[in-house]
Amino acid sequence: MDIRDISTIARKELRSFFTDKIILIQILLLPFAIVFGYSMLMGGMSSSMIDSATKVEKAYYINAPESISKAFDEIGMKSVPASDLEKIKKQIKDKESNLLLVFPEDFRKQLTDINIADVKEGKNIPDVEIWYNSEKTASNGVYSTVKEILNSLQPKIFTVNAEKDNVSHNLGDENYEFRHIMGTIFPMMVFMAIFMVCMNLAANSIAGDKERGFLNTMLITPVKRSSIAFGKSVSLFTASILGSLSAFIGMAVSLPQLSNSIKIDADMTYSVSEYILLFVITITAIFVLTAMLMIISALAKDVKQATTIAPIILMVLIIATMLTMNDNFSEMIEGLGFINNIIPVWNSFIMMQHLLQMNYSMTDVLISGGVNLVFAAILIVILGQLFKNEKIVNNT
């Protein structure tokens, strides 16, 4: 191999990437758009579900005592006469209204006359009726809110975890919920975004050159075939680094937005070094994926065939991320221990999850990154050998 030849080919490939506006947009903007856009979409959906479950509207009450009705007025419920009972029940059934709370007419008197013997036997106890429609999300949400208020109005004989200064009964990380969500969704988004870019670039870089006949022209020059393979690898690795940077900017920008959208008050404490580790562990896995895509492109007869086969890897990626997202598999995955570190690409999923959840070991990160780099290097050597095979190069 000749370093100058590798450098020349890499510069030629990069020049073709950066002078093509479409490719440039794919590298620099597409990963950002996918990660940021998906985060905002997910945040919007979560926010909408939370709002629909907690927002109180089209909810009414009948015969509520004045001391109790104030609590329902504050959340937006409205008082209606008893004569509207059947009408509103029909509206709830037809999903036009959400809830109707009905107190007995002599509710206050019943409370006054109640005795302990009746309570023990479950007799003559005032019954408050809540009419709602379980087929409607908003109705279910209002029902939960109203029931919680009614429970809070009942007499208390003891408290549970009453608020005290400087006392937290939660012995775990208060921000774990948010970090857990980040650790389950962002690895998938980042890898998918970068993979989409690398798939198209790899297909056009090798299979595209074969299809256009340009690769044969290069092969008759004095440049070694292994140098051509390494030169193309350098250019694609460079593009993948830029794509990864774009995806990580999208992740960094969307983190606070996502936190606000899903109503989680989390204190983001990721340090610069942790962001660097996330970036590095992702890049090492992307190198492996890019090398695999280049081998597929070299074996394919044309761009169409290359882009048809490559999504198989993407499907494997999706399945892998779904496994890391599923709590039922978490114990099994943790039980694998060191094995997780020596499986290329998979190790990066696990390490990204642990880094985002602030539960990582620097040793594990370094081992995983090193395994990925070694495996990527092996794949590039295989690619160089494929370039020496005339049948593969000439599609014969």
Image: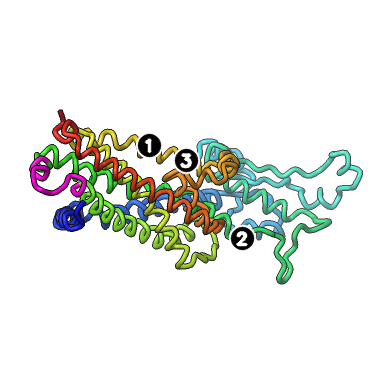
Residue drawn at point x = 14 percent, y = 38 percent: 210
Mark 3 vs mark 2, CA separation in Å: 25 Å
**Along the line of sight, which residue is nearer the eye, 228 or 262?**
228
Range drawn in magenta: 216-228
Q: Which mark is residue 315?
A: 1
Residue 226 vertical position relative to residue 252 in the rendered view, above or below: above
Mark 1 vs mark 3, CA separation in Å: 11 Å
**Along the line of sight, which residue is nearer the eye, 345 or 227?**
227
Name the quadrant containing residue 27. bottom left
Instruction: From the viewer's perspective, tell me whether residue 9 is left or right of residue 376.
Output: left
Residue drawn at point x = 67 percent, y = 45 percent: 102
Note whether residue 88 is visible. Answer: no
Residue drawn at point x = 27 percent, y = 43 percent: 199
Mark 2 vs mark 1, CA separation in Å: 34 Å
Residue drawn at point x = 47 percent, y = 47 percent: 347
Q: Which residue is mark 2?
A: 174
- Marks 1 and 2: in contact by CB < 8 Å? no
Q: Main secondary structure of the magenta part?
A: helix
Q: Which residue is mark 3?
A: 322
